[in-house]
Image (spheres, rainbow, N blue to C red):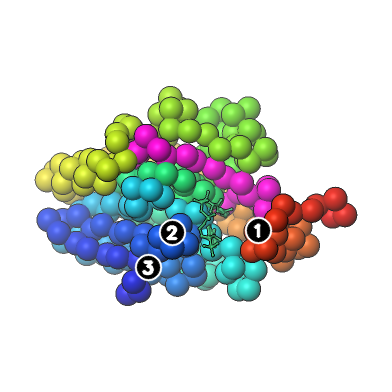
Amino acid sequence: MIKEILVHTEGGVMTITLNRLERKNSITLAMYGAMADAIAAADADPAVRVVVLQGHETVFSAGNDIGDFLDRPASGMESPAFRFLRGLPTFSKPLVAAVCGPAVGIGTTLLFHCDLVYAGDNAAFSMPFVNLGLCPEAASSLLVPQMLGYHRAAEALLLGEPFMVEAALEVGLVNRVVPPTEANGVAQAAARKLAAKPISALVETKRLMKQGQQQRVLQQMADEGAIFSRLLVEPAAKEAFTAFMEKRHPDFSKL
Ligand code: COA
């Protein structure tokens, strides 16, 4: 295990905590790998009945580590990032998230795969893939229009505009909004409630709710992955990543 991903299991609940606050919980390849391993282990372990994903009360995640995007553009189905992504819709047990502060890129798109989401009133969601020369991932090009409606999805995915917790609550991405200091506790309480229920009934109910579109979601992820891998090494993305590292605005005028 690595120190940027903390994994703790107690009372049937595995809690995965993003712990890279100095980089706003942005996610490196090693962190994707550790989370993918934890989720796979949780699925296989009968002692784990629920998984909670959480960040810090000031920030959930700033998305993919941009230095990694630049230096080690992951591609292919076996990359740790893709392993993590595929593990979300195929995870058979309940997945609960606690989200506070910025949730950027994968920090927002992973929520569409969670069963319950509790948010701090400081939560802000954004999917600025286009601004980075990229396309959506985690089947968000399918799931965001389904949940937000096409035009709001276009605002989020084409304009790359953030949306606040009130909008997330209204569309049903978030179950409940609480003070940031309480979000992790509220998620834990829900997870403990779930963990006390009969596991077969939970797993079958989740499977039945999801079965109509699981294959579609996995196919969309694969389609997005192929395009994402190509865009990741194109000049627009390189300019966006370099601009972020150099703390300047990107210049796409010649691209
Ligand atoms: N990858 C790598 N480093 C990141 C990062 C990321 N995704 N997000 C933030 N950091 C780093 C910053 O470069 C900064 O480093 P420094 O202290 O060496 O200058 C540090 O984390 C703190 O970030 P900062 O931007 O100063 O914090 P903030 O509170 O003003 O803003 C965010 C927080 C999340 C809104 C902002 O950091 C952000 O927009 N990050 C990029 C998000 C992004 O585009 N992610 C990719 C999505 S696909």
Q: Nearer the viewer, residue 50 or 199?
A: 50
- The stretch in magenta equals 114-137
Residue 131 is one of the magenta-drawn residues: yes
Is residue 166 shown left or right of residue 66? left
Numbered circles on residues, count: 3
Please provide percent x and percent y for residue 126: 54, 42
Give the residue displayed 63% in from the left and 33% down from the top: 155
SS at mark 2 in the image: loop
Number of residues whose C-alpha sits closer than 10 Å to that of mark 2, classed few (under 14), some (14–19) or many (20 or more): many
Task: Give the amino acid at mark 2.
Answer: Asn
As drawn, the residue found furthest toward the right would be 254
Q: Is residue 189 visible?
A: yes
Is residue 200 shown left or right of residue 102? left
Tell me which corner region of the image, top left, top right, bottom left or bottom right, holds residue 174. top left
Q: Which residue position is annotated with label 3?
A: 4
Q: Which residue position is annotated with label 1?
A: 247
Please provide percent x and percent y for residue 53: 33, 53
Number of residues whose C-alpha sits closer than 10 Å to that of mark 1, classed few (under 14), some (14–19) or many (20 or more): few
Tell me which corner region of the image, top left, top right, bottom left or bottom right, holds residue 178. top left
Give the residue displayed 51% in from the left and 48% down from the top: 104
Is residue 64 shown left or right of residue 251? left
SS at mark 3 in the image: loop
Mark 1 vs ligand 1: CB under 8 Å?
yes
Q: CA distance from mark 1 to mark 2?
A: 18 Å
Is residue 27 shown left or right of residue 12? right
